[in-house]
Image: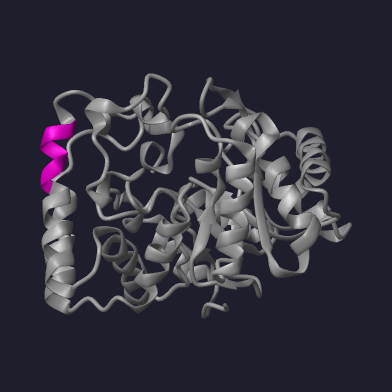
Amino acid sequence: MELSHTDLGDGLSVSGLGFGGMALTPVYGEVEPSEALATLNYAVDAGVSFIDTANVYGGGSNEEVIGRMLAKRRDEVTIATKFGIMGTPAAGYTGTRGDAGYVRESAEASLRRLGTDVIDLYYLHRRDLTVPIEETVGAMSGLVTEGKVRHLGLSEVTADELRAAHAVHPIAAVQSEWSIWSRDVEQHVVPAAAELGVGFVPYSPLGRGFLTGTVNAASLGKNDFRHNFPRFATGAVDANARVVDVVQAVAADVGATPAQVALAWLLAQGERFGLGVVPIPGTRKPARIEENIGALSTVLTDAHLVELASAAALAVGERSADPNWVSQGRE
């Protein structure tokens, strides 16, 4: 199956929906590598050929699992990976690095784990605030010159950081959290991306599952990554159910699921701001992949969009425990 494609920036065109690989590591509970591989292959079979990972997911194990899939299907997949964060999501992040030597070291390690000779889209996962972004992106551009990377991306940068980086080398995509309940990027980063011709890849487009209405935050496992986020704290969860109520009401009205509505809303926002938007929901269940694909044909009216736009104001808690970890705290 082949999905429609969306143009990001710098000539990069990808499937209209991507797949976030972090869910296939033990951040939301344990997962078997064989199960993860089966889910990846199902996604590609279904036409979701834009696969996203990072060197810190599972301490590199996520890239290795994806590498097993790429060994047989490299020409079917656009692979994106990232560098710059020290630590792991499950054990905790310990800092960032963006010096030129680390850029090269990280890329070489990711290429080995992925079992490929080129990374299609290479992101700076988080800025190292002790290193000028021009230096980091300059080192990344050297990888493009050498043919080890095709396109460059940035994650959770401010509008000014994006402009400074883009002046060094064309940026194909910004990946930051963006969803019905996380809209701060619309103030500065999204307009800057549209101005520069840079695409946007929203991570956590379903609010780490919460917007689907299927997450019982009170029963999350003790090692669940979501315990790190203020919106999943005791007290905030009940208040944030009001956001889900809005999404569910629209879903019932259009005959779709809440997940489809949340993703379709992002695609509509892309049209509103005039830039390519490709969400990357993650899942361990093949059925959810089919459900998410349904968002590409989910139609929301102007009235629905207005109703959903009001939901962000109902959210309780910041989207990150450390606002400076994301663009919101540095804008």
Asked whether residue 49 is in view, the answer is: yes
> Which portion, as a residue range, is magenta?
237-242
Relative to the observer, which residue lies in front, 213 or 241? Answer: 213
275 is higher (above) or lower (below) than 72? below
Quarter of the image that includes the N terminus: bottom right
Task: Quadrant for residue 292, please give it.
Answer: bottom left
- Residue at 12% x, 56% y is 246
120 is higher (above) or lower (below) than 13? above
Return the residue found at the far right: 146
- Residue at 76% x, 42% y is 110
Q: Main secondary structure of the magenta part?
A: helix
Q: Is residue 239 magenta?
A: yes
Q: Is residue 157 magenta?
A: no
Q: Is residue 111 left or right of residue 162?
A: right
- Image location of residue 18, percent across then percent down: 52, 62
Q: Is residue 306 left or right of residue 228?
A: left
- Image location of residue 166, percent across then percent down: 62, 59
Quarter of the image that includes the C terminus: top left
Task: Quadrant for residue 315, please give it.
Answer: top left
- Image location of residue 214, percent across then percent down: 26, 45
Asked whether residue 124 is in view, the answer is: no
- Residue at 76% x, 37% y is 106
Q: Is residue 212 left or right of residue 249?
A: right
Relative to the observer, which residue lies in front, 13 or 28? Answer: 28
Relative to the observer, which residue lies in front, 291 or 141? Answer: 291
- Image location of residue 109, percent across then percent down: 80, 38
